[in-house]
Amino acid sequence: MKSLAIFFLVIVLSGVFVLCHILQYENEIRALLQRSVPFVGADIPRMDGIDGDGIRVAVIDTGIDFNHPDLFGWGYDGKVIGGYNFIHEGEPPMDTNGHGTQVAGVIAADGEIKGIAPKAKILAYKVSENGEGVSSDLIIRAIEKAIDDDADIINISLGVNKTNASIDRAVNHALQREIFVVTAAGNDGPALKTIGSPGRNFGSVTVGATYNNLTSSMVATLEIDEKPYTVIPMVGSPKLENPVTGKLVFANYGKIDDFKDIDVKDAVVIVERGSDIEGELLYFSIKETNAANAGAKALLVYNNEPGIFLGELIHEFIEPEYKPRIPVVSIDRDDGLKIKELIGNTNATLNLFYNPDFVAHFSSRGPVSPFYIKPDLVAPGAYINTTQNNGGYNFTSGTSYAAPHVSGAAALLLQKNPQLHHHELKSLLLTTSKPVSDAYGNEFSVNEAGSGRLDIGNAYSARLIIIPPNFVVNMSSDKLVGEQQLELKLIDGTLDSLEVKFEGPEFIKFAYFLEANTVRIKMNMVEENFGDYEGKITIKHENTRYVIPFLLHCTPGSVSVTQQDQKLFFEINHPEKWDFAKISVINSKDGETKTVTTTPFKKASVKINENAEYWVEAKIRVGDNSSNAYNTIEIGSISGNHSELDMIAIPEKQIIIIAGIVVMIGTVGLVKRKQNIMKV
């Protein structure tokens, strides 16, 4: 319930609310403060009257409840001006699940709560009934319909957990039509290589999830046997200066009697939510008091029903002198039951700290390719208060709700600068993002957070577009120099005050050259350090700091590539004697992959039939070991059309389009759909 959420925010932000009690703005400011909207800087464009007016955002999802007062109206005069119901054709795309309504609310809610771009219009494409599955064919049809309906932006908060070339081709078609495409990274983190289609698409903007500046914005991490679990700190839980580590002990429901016959001295105690006595109100504050009195270091409370919950230690029924002494977190029921099975000689490590820019445990990670970076950036995706079916509101979590923050941001920038191309919008959003760091102040890697956390205020004020917004450099034992050009496009101002800095491996000597509207970057490897590294180029222009992250591959071997007419020829080099190599050639436009094998005595080639950038990956075998080498080549000299029958080389994968492929909706299901903040 909104009123309870505001109650907690009053505790944390009471000083802010005093300033906000100006009569005509009070309700709007309250609505904004209970969400992530001002945290990502969306209130800055609104000061200039930029609110998404005139921008059409396509939401490919479970439909939208256009009877919700914050998303009201179907048709030309409504919030949802069009769309299509692919599940029940001929009927309006009404949402019966809630997921699409939640996504649309983040983008453009305009009522009790305000979305990122409240005056933007929505096109609703219903491709799923229950929010649990959808065919890849329907996603493709929805993308094509959004193109036909002149969408400016497409938001896809769903996807498959593997590569799907057909979906990626549809996304590329939208990009070719100058539509900005935003995709959710998925909720299969924290493992690496967990982003599927369309999130792995090279040209789309793929969004992971951070925590949110909501309630106390306290973040908790729990590790048991080096495995992380998702936990939520309870409101009022004390912050920790250092992590707490202790043996894991189960104490039933956390009553006084539950601690009588067990030793919890310096332990991390886990208990079940609620009580075994019907009607008994066993508040979290009571459980915390009993655990602290027994000598426990920390308390985990797992749910007594499916899902996770947001609890509070400080409430109107506590004892007058009560003050929490140990950290308390809530945990999903399934995870809680799994943790109970681990109890024995197992230790748990718990940490609580303030960091809204912490990448959420569930957020899917890259890499998806050695040739580009995913995710592109992150945005708030935890504890997002948004619209729900039947006129309601709730807190929910998942990268599904991070992605629409970026879609709304794109709507604001596009309203301000309607001439921007989709790749220029992408650059503004990525290069102006803010760094995100872990519990110890270390920045998350690009595979976890991309360029950083969305900052609409920075992007809105930016006067410089940098292409590309990130890049990959390939070096090898016979190629110790890497180069990259950054093209600069001014929105306003001059390039007189440009400052360029390098942050990266110490064995790289860096130099740059400013030539007209281009920054030419040169990296020299002064000593061989084979492996994968990351770094960043920072450009300061008129008090705005732009960040361009990069990945660096240093490999012992190399693969050179040359073009002759419609053929690419390859040559393998390695400091040791190699005997076999497999070469993969990937068309960057659609991901189509061809492979060819070679030996030191065989000339390898692949036929191509269109102009594109091609990515080349070679797996080189030396004795019993193998290593990779990478290269890219831009082809622009092929003329005319050529049949697929002209192609030679063997496809690495035959893609079979299965219309009934099951996909995962981009909501992690961390929070129940009708969850309220509970005290017991």
Image (cartoon, rainbow, N blue to C red):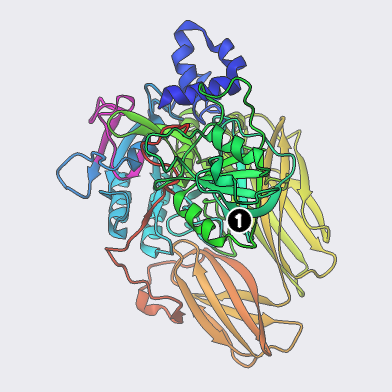
Residue 419, image x and y in percent?
47, 35
Q: In the image, is residue 278 above or below residue 639?
A: above
Query: Does 121 appear in magenta?
Result: no
Q: Is residue 403 visible?
A: yes
Q: Residue furthest top?
A: 23
Which of the 4 image quarters holds residue 672? top left
- In the image, which residues are magenta? 55-83
Indicate the amino acid at tag 1. Asn
Residue 316, image x and y in percent?
51, 21
Residue 496, image x and y in percent?
75, 33
At label 1, counting other C-alpha atoms closer than 10 Å, the crowd grade (few under 14, some 14-19, many 20 or more) is: many
Query: Does 68 appear in magenta?
Result: yes
Instruction: Judge left or right: residue 315 versus residue 75.
Output: right
Q: Is residue 424 visible?
A: no
Q: In the image, is residue 346 above or below residue 100?
A: below
Image point 16% across, 41% down: which residue? 91
Which of the 4 image quarters holds residue 455? top right
Q: Quadrant of the N terminus?
A: top left
Front one among 447 and 539? 447
Residue 319, image x and y in percent?
57, 23
Instruction: Judge left or right: residue 516 versus residue 1.
Output: right
Front one among 395 and 196? 395
Q: Residue furthest bottom?
A: 601
Front one among 43 and 229? 229
Q: Which residue is mark 1?
A: 447
Which of the 4 image quarters holds residue 54? top left
Q: Residue furthest left?
A: 90
Image point 64% across, 49% down: which residue? 268
Q: Dot 1 lies on which element?
A: helix
Image point 51% across, 48% down: which residue? 252
Front one among 589 and 166? 166
Q: In the image, is residue 473 above or below residue 178?
A: below
